[in-house]
Amino acid sequence: MQGAGSPIGFDEHSGRLNPGLLAHSELPAAVIDALQQQFGLVIVEQANGWHLAWQDRQLVLRHTELVKQGDILVDFSSGAATYRRKFGGGKSEAIAKAVGVTKKSGLAVIDATAGLGRDALVLASLGATVTLVERNPLVAALLWDGLRRARLDPELQDWLPGRLTLVFSQAIDALQQLPAPDVVYLDPMFPAREKSAAVKKEMRAFHDVVGADPDADALWQAAFALASKRVVVKRPGYAEFLAGQKPSMSIEGKNNRFDVYVKAAL
């Protein structure tokens, strides 16, 4: 089992990405080729611990021993995602105000810690063009599959794939190589205190698979150097400022706050 001390995807000593595991169970050949070539996933017949599997024509993250954990996947057309997109508040959401989509349409945003892409979906639905940066091969593969299925969805195919682009890379490398966006958005891993059992299960999975973000402070420096307009950092309400940097303003959300570092007017 891959534990929190040895997250799948990143070796702190070598600084290299480790391959994730993909259980071979009726996987389409085209999907196997894409996942091997793009994310370096290792195909195994029998997985042990955290791995990707093919279930109902979609990629899911699961654990061989944690039956009650439940599958984790990226589904941009799920009921929850659709409800948030249509009825979650839109431009009145804290993240929308923090990033600035309420002030300017068509913003270019780099989400340097993309995770399952939920915040990126909200921003894209409000007109932003978002580059999803994800360093972990298993999570990046989930995002890739979510985008693949979005291209087949009648409600999403005409707009979402054109507004979300996936980059499989260490965030620090991406922030040093990608063109300057209007906004860089950071949501580094942080110990969760949510009471929801479902959230706890998902956060356990992410801590096990992805691990912590020890380079979070360095990410802030790189983000601030790259962004042309602002940097937005999502933090738990109880957390200190990232890199000890006091923001220009903070916008409180339901369970988190968004620290905004303004460089120039939108």
Image (cartoon, rainbow, N blue to C red):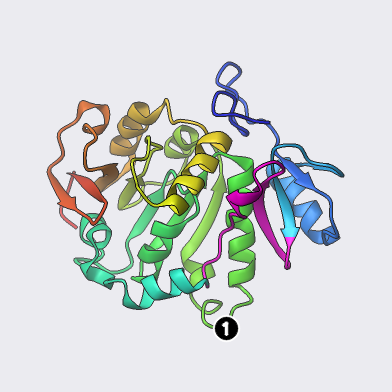
Say above or below: 222 vs 158.
Answer: above
Q: Determine the residue located farthest toward the left in the rendered image.
A: 249
Label 1 SS: loop
Q: In this view, does 137 lie to the left or right of 202?
A: right
**Closer to the camera, 264 or 134?**
134
Q: Where is residue 86 in the image (x, y as percent from the top left)?
A: 36, 78
| Depicted 100 relative to depicted 172: above or below | below
Q: Can residue 229 be seen in this view?
A: no
Q: What stretch is highlighted in magenta?
A: 55-77
Instruction: Say few, some or many: other residues with alpha carbon within 10 Å of mark 1 (under 14 / 14 to 19 / 20 or more).
Output: few
Q: Position of residue 175 (x, y in %)?
A: 42, 38
Who's the residue at 22% across and 43% down the image?
Answer: 237
Name the residue type under label 1.
Pro
Choose top left, top right, bottom left or bottom right for residue 168.
Answer: top right
Is residue 63 on the magenta stretch? Answer: yes
Quarter of image, res 21: top right
Q: Where is residue 111 in the image (x, y as percent from the top left)?
A: 41, 49
Question: Percent from the top left, x then y, of residue 232?
Answer: 27, 46
Q: Is residue 114 magenta?
A: no
Side of 78 relative to 1 (left or right): left
| Extreme residue in the top direction | 13
Return the residue at label 1.
Answer: 154
Which residue is pictured at 73% across the width and 53% down the height? 53
Check the picture and name the quadrant holding the C terminus: bottom left
Question: Looking at the figure, which quarter contains the N terminus?
Answer: top right
Q: Is residue 203 left or right of residue 226?
A: right
